[in-house]
Image: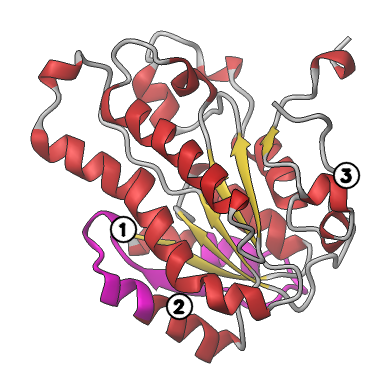
Amino acid sequence: MSRALPNPLPSDALRGRVLLITGAGAGLGRATALRCARAGATVVLLGRTIAKLEATFDAILALGDVPEPAIYPMDLAGASDRDMHECIDRIVESCGGLHGIVHAAAHWQDFRPMQDVLASDWAGTLATNLNAPWALTRVALETLKTADDGCVVFCDCEPAQQGRAFFGAYGVAKAALREMVAAWTAEQPGVRMHLFDPGPMRTTMRLLGYPGAPPETYPPPESAAEVLSALFDPALGADADRAGQLCWSAAPPPEAAH
């Protein structure tokens, strides 16, 4: 997917930058929030479960010598356009700006035939995995344009790229997400946009989908977060070729794997 992995984030590379991270209560979102905070970013933790966000908040403070994060509870599946506007307005007002968004929130029910997907599950899956990333980015775009090297990262899923059976609404949402980001990038919105495939990770969602696989066979989300967070490095944004690379993966390119 990617031609090369981005360079690891140097210390304080994100100092003075404000990043909104959805799904920050667990998994990739939490790991990315911690990694970006270590690099000096002020991270806004968005999710629907306050207790999980508070746990991420405490873990960031425990790092020491990092900007204090902010918590923004919101259920993306049920959020209105007004909710999206209020979210971005409050972040800008409280944090002094917004430089980037990580769309790490995900909703997935289970593997089942397309005809067996419940209408409520279909709507909820598309709302979280497709509609919310579009709506939140759309509302934030003008603010991101005024930031130095504004950047948005959308999370992809490699298996869902191949039209596999039983991926249901999740596979449909990811296919539409890729088309949306590609179209947005072609429109040259004045903000860097990237698709990032974290690969299999040791997360609750993965283990629910593949209960027979031993958890230790999957890398922790911190491994993928190391790559994802580096996409916000201003040094990468200053490299026209790499800044224009749409798709990235946590895995090294084939030639680097041997």
Mark found first going from the N terminus, 2 or 3:
3
Callout 2: SS = helix
Instruction: Tell me the residue at 49%/56% (across/down).
Output: 24
Q: Which mark is residue 7?
A: 3
Question: Crowding at label 2, few (<14), some or many (≥20) Cα neighbours within 10 Å?
Answer: many
Camera sees residue 54:
no
Residue assigned mark 2: 88
Instruction: Tell me the residue at 49%/65% (across/down).
Output: 45
Residue 173 at x, y = what percent? Answer: 35, 36
Q: CA distance from mark 1 to mark 3?
A: 32 Å
* Residue placed most toward the observer, 21 or 31: 21
Residue 75 at x, y = what percent? Answer: 28, 60
- What amino acid does circle 2 point to? Ile
Depicted 229 relative to depicted 208: above or below = below
Image quarter for residue 200? top right
Residue 246 at x, y = what percent? Answer: 68, 41
Image quarter for residue 168? top left
Picture mark count? 3
> Magenta stretch?
56-85
Residue assigned mark 1: 76
- What amino acid does circle 3 point to? Asn
Camera sees residue 57:
yes
Q: CA distance from mark 2 to mark 3?
A: 29 Å
